[in-house]
Amino acid sequence: MEWEKNSWRNYKTKYVPDYSNTTELNRVENVLKQSSSLVFANEIRSLDKKLADISAGNGFLLHGGDCAESFSEFNADNIESTFKVVLQMAIILTAGIKVPITKIGRIAGQFAKPRTNSTEIIDGLELPSYRGDIINDITFDEKLRQPDPNRMLKAYSQSASTIALLKSFSDRGYTDLKHLQSWNMEFIKNRKQEERYHHLTNQIKDSLKFMETLGLISNDAPHLKKVEYFISHEALLLPYEEALTRIDSENGKIYNTGAHFVWIGDRTRFLDSAHVEYCRGINNPIGIKCGPTLDPEELIKLIDILNPNNNLGRITLITRFGNDKIETYLPKLIRAIKNEGRSVIWSCDPMHGNTIKGAENGIKTRPFERILDEVKKNFSIHTSEGTKAGGIHLEMTGQNVTECTGGIDEISEEDLSNRYRTHCDPRLNANQAIEMAFLITDKFRNSN
């Protein structure tokens, strides 16, 4: 079937807002079409190769970041803290599971969110639900809750600034492995965890010194001082995605230049979906969120639409069931994929299926023990089914927030209101994210 970057408009759309001012929407789309690409095709091809390796069993995907970025919390310190935690997690995973770690951030574009209810009621007033800063405002105000296309321009601008900061952190020697003991140590407050990290970094430093002595690496080896860090977001607001879709002059292929990697959400991955149609035509790697409602036969049909040539690394299945449902649903999907011979990366999202509301205060949270339990069961299921657990997908932040209960900090329901800053769903804080990295390495070693 022929594909155009606007052919999604002929399909069923969900969670794409109806803008009342279509003239202004068209103007914003034209501005974005004339704007510079945020990422480039050669970077996307580099990610393709890494994901193909993971799909072939040689690597692991670390995919994490904000639930939903916000305009108000945009600052260099927040970006830096999350970047540092991801680097630290990657070192822990690399040393623990002995495979290359590909790092993708939910950052520089993760501004839109699907919501279960289209409206919400406060004190008898019903207004449109908050759908992410790229669409409307979190303030419960009649005017600010209306979808505003001009917000796409601010999202683009903040994404560009975020990418520039991330490249600066990566290029200026910030990621030099020789300095890894100083990375983010202020977050490691648990003595046992601190000792384990120090032991790990000392081992790495001794290995580097040994290789230098033998002349196997030079003192200024660039691959020890820089890191490839890719960006991603859910391809939800299709007018924005279309406006940033370009033809690469080098190979003539079509790419979404707003992110290296995009995914289709659990609510928008049905067969006649506009989001599936859009992603069908771009050459970026694609993620598919897989929840309990996904039928195995439908999944095979989706993959055939999105990856008809069965290319390695093209499709990442991001499973999100909940710790009480994963043993029921994940084996069915694995068996369908194996029986049909489809090439995919299996990535576990242990966050979305484990969201609850506090019994006392009604605040939305995610218990760390449930998150960890889903990760453990994910590894065990893949071992028993003869497949590889290829990645982890986490909503997390480098900030010292109190949004998920449990973990080393033993955050309780009473603690949630202390530093609950998310604009949407609860995130792991830095300590919990680092703890998760250590626990993944333990489970990975035990399952192989």
Image: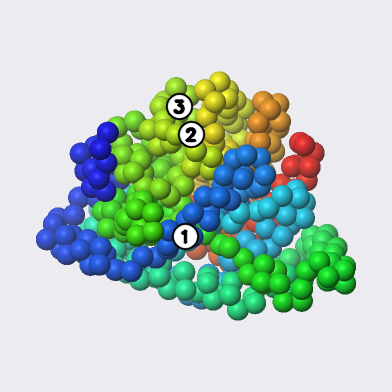
Res 42 label = 1
Residue holding disc 2: 310
Secondary structure type for disc 3: helix
Q: Distance between the residues labelled 1 and 2?
A: 21 Å
Answer with left or right where residue 323 lies relative to residue 191.
left
> Where does the image place residue 55, in percent across and percent down from the top left?
59, 40
- Mark 2 lies on a secondary structure that is loop
Classed neighbour count for the residue bearing mark 3: other residues with Cα under 10 Å, few (<14), some (14–19), many (≥20): some
Image point (87%, 68%), residue name: 214
Label at residue 300: 3
CA gap, disc 3 and disc 2: 11 Å
Q: Is residue 404 visible?
A: no
Is the residue under label 2 in contact with that under label 3 (CB below 8 Å)?
no
> CA separation, marks 1 and 3?
29 Å
The residue shown at (57%, 44%) is 52
Which residue does the image show at 31% across and 39% down from the upper left? Answer: 277
